[in-house]
Amino acid sequence: MRTLTGLWRLVRLILRRDRIRLPVWVLGLAAVVIGSGASLVPLYPEQADIQQYVDLFGDNPALVAFAGPGYGFDDPNLGVILVNETQLWACIGIALMSIFLVNRHTRAEEDAERTEVLRSSIVGRHAPTAAAVVVVAAANIVFAALCGVAFVALGYGATGTIAYAAGLAGCGLVFTGLTAALAQLAGSSRATLGLATAVLGLAFVLRAVGDITGNVLRWLSPIGWAQGVRAYAGEQWWPVALCLAATLLAVAAAFWLATRRDLGSGILPQRPGPARAGMWARSPIGLAVRLQRATIVAWMAGLALMGGVYGSIGEDVEEMIEDNETFADVLAQLEGADVTDAFFATAVSMQAVLAAGFAISAALRIRSEEAAGRVEPILAGPVGRWRWAWSHLLVAAVGTVLVVAAGGVGVGASYAAVSGDASQVLRLTGAALATVPAVLVLAGVAVALFGASLRLALVAWAGLGVVVLVELFGELLRLPSWSRMVSPLHHVPGLPAEDLRAVPLLVLTAIAVALTAIGLARFRSRDLQVG
Amino acid sequence: MIRCSSLVKSFGSTRALDGLDLEVAPGEVHGFLGPNGAGKTVTMRIVLGLLRADAGEVTVLGGDPWRDAVSLHRRLAYVPGDTNLWPNLTGGEIIDVLGGLRGGLDDSRRATLVDRFDLDPRKKARTYSKGNRQKVALVAALASDAELLVLDEPTSGLDPLMEAVFQDCILDARAEGRTVLLSSHILAEVEKLCDRVTIIRQGATVQTGTLDELRHLTRTTVTAEVRESPEALGDLAGVHDLVVDGQRASFDVDSDHLDEAISRLAALGVTSLTSHPPTLEELFLRHYGDELADIGVAGTAGPDDGHP
């Protein structure tokens, strides 16, 4: 295999470069998953408790969309709850890890023209891609093995645990191979990330629809394959083989595509662009819009699509409750709060977490522009730091509003379509927009950190990590209630299930503005930095 | 136009500038020389107000570059040494961005420059080579009507043909009465373009003056074949490193002794003669000789302490 010459040296190079990053990903993800698994044990000590969980959960489509098909609910054990509570999120986590790491070591390296240097030495054509796949595949397997060992130690059944871990690793492997192939197809590392996360989003949606309607769509999604092993519920192993086959196919496709293109280019064609800039080039804000518009539109489309899926389930939620006696009881206990609205409140808040990802990356555009040295030629012109920075931040803020609104319109329009109630569009869009101040607080944190230094600015992503932890896993991990206060989203009234309260929104907005002002003030008095 | 005195700038424990002086007079092309890591780029960034000096005085166009950055930048244009561009914009768009921010470029001048530099403005920046990226920055700067041009190794990555175009453009700019601060590693370029030169080393100015004064420091390398024995050349004042191989002699000679050496060669009966002017490398080798000796290098590289 001359095309793989130098593979092991490249593997060592990646391990050396990511000696911090890899353990942080693997151990961080494992800690959350294992912690969730551990917290379930004391929560459901008796079979009766387990049965109660299953009865509560039922086959409520709203919960199915955010959890899974609920295999084994007819004869439940603790492992079934473990799968239902953790598997979907673990799959998304491991897929994201695989996407980011593979892109970092394939297309991003190529964009930085480091692959060129490597390839000019005694290194085979496919060795860099293969090395990235080997390392990330190993990280997937280590993560799955850690979870498996811990679950067995916690007392979960051995066979089910092996199936659970194999499904996780399989899902991660598919996204590892897929990203390697997309890196060949796309024209840049940004495009690779965009395509790969879009595929992940699609995988989530396909399995959500498939799980709710019980149709074949779930088998089009690698996440569906991971869930299809039926861990703790009469295991079946062929989905693991399906994952491995898909991975091998994707890696083979990556190799094949790599022979069909030049280093540094993509398969998707590049057309010549305009020779002159439009009117947008006359101001920093025009430039900021031009630079960010494609990302904003892509995020709007993504969230609208996702919202569309949630909205389309809305009607089922109601029907399901009419059929389900247990749920009718629960509904009675909620003293009139509408379960459909509660479902939409959860959907809106999930979308807000995603939108926060957009908001932080859009706000940190000022960071990447500075780090890449692209701010220098701008500031060397008659544009001050203040004007340059707020231009980008204004675009980030407006973009956040648009992205959140698109998500809300998606939910609303699709629910309006299935329910025949057009007023839902405005109502649910409004509910989504109420999360904007909280999302902007997270972007404000990014700006405040950016004011201190470029390196520190990246800590803003840890802020999003905390919010995800608190919002999605807070209850499961039995975090103390004060910890939820940390998340700005926690302070947003849960529209449309709750009433609108203006004060928290105003306070959150004020905090976002203050954080931004602090960051910009510090940025104006510090040296420009590079890298 | 630019006056820096006793500039000091530290990054952590590294002292990048240590009492640097620089003075650029209106209408002149001023060469700014120094090995890698001497502090040229840091100085230019301070002049642009992108960095703030720890100590010392800076005046640019009569203002404080940190405080009055925006108003001063209306009157100057900058070309960085390593131009980073937005990968998804075309070269033409980027020229318009950089020009548009200063209120628009002269369209005919822009078109002429794009043509002269043979730049394809419809290509996305990610596909440009280093030389083409440099052209984008140069066109944007030269097409402006800035009275001061700050150019940080602007020809790095350009081919010799484009270097010649660049030199013509700078001579045009001087003829229009613009002032240029030009850092460069190419002595031939500096010799052709610059009225005065400042040489820095380890963050401090070691030499500043006109080119004649600079030439004073330099030697010309001569290789000749003569009919009689060339051994006697070694006795001449200003001749260094004479190597004799039969009828063939090669040596370095101080510029102010060149005349004598050539007369003596002629007397020996020259059959072939090549000479080349001092290269920057040779200048550096002379000027930084002790430093090179310290690190045990007698060859080509300038000292590099890792701060571009």
Image: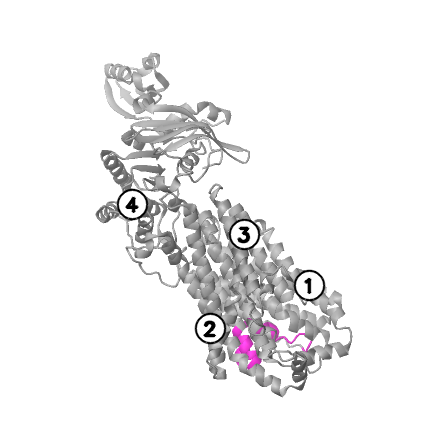
Q: Which of the labelled discs sits on residue A481, or is there none? A: 1
Task: Please determine whether, in this image, residue A296 is positioned above or below residue B263.
Answer: below
The residue furthest right is A46
Disc 3 residue type (three-letter): Leu
Image-based side of B284 in relation to A508, left or right? left
- Which residue position is annotated with label 4? B139
Please report the bounds of the magenta region as a residue range: A205-234
User: Which label lies toward us, 3 or 4?
Assistant: 3
Q: Are marks 1 and 2 in contact (CB under 8 Å)?
A: no
Looking at the rendered structure, the secondary structure element under dot 4 is: helix
Residue at the image position 36 percent from the left and 46 percent from the top = B130
Looking at the rendered structure, the secondary structure element under dot 2 is: helix
Is residue B90 in sight in this rendering? no
Q: Is residue A40 magenta?
A: no
Q: Which of the labelled discs sits on residue A102, or is there none? A: none
In terms of sequence position, does the residue under pointer 1 or pointer 2 come before the other? 2
Where residue B229 appears, as percent x and y from the top left, is: 30, 15
Disc 2 residue type (three-letter): Val
- Which residue position is annotated with label 3? A458
Distance of mark 1 from mark 4, alpha carbons? Answer: 60 Å
User: Which label lies toward us, 2 or 3?
Assistant: 2
Distance of mark 1 from mark 3, alpha carbons? Answer: 27 Å
Q: Residues within 10 Å of mark 3 (few under 14, many from 20)?
A: some
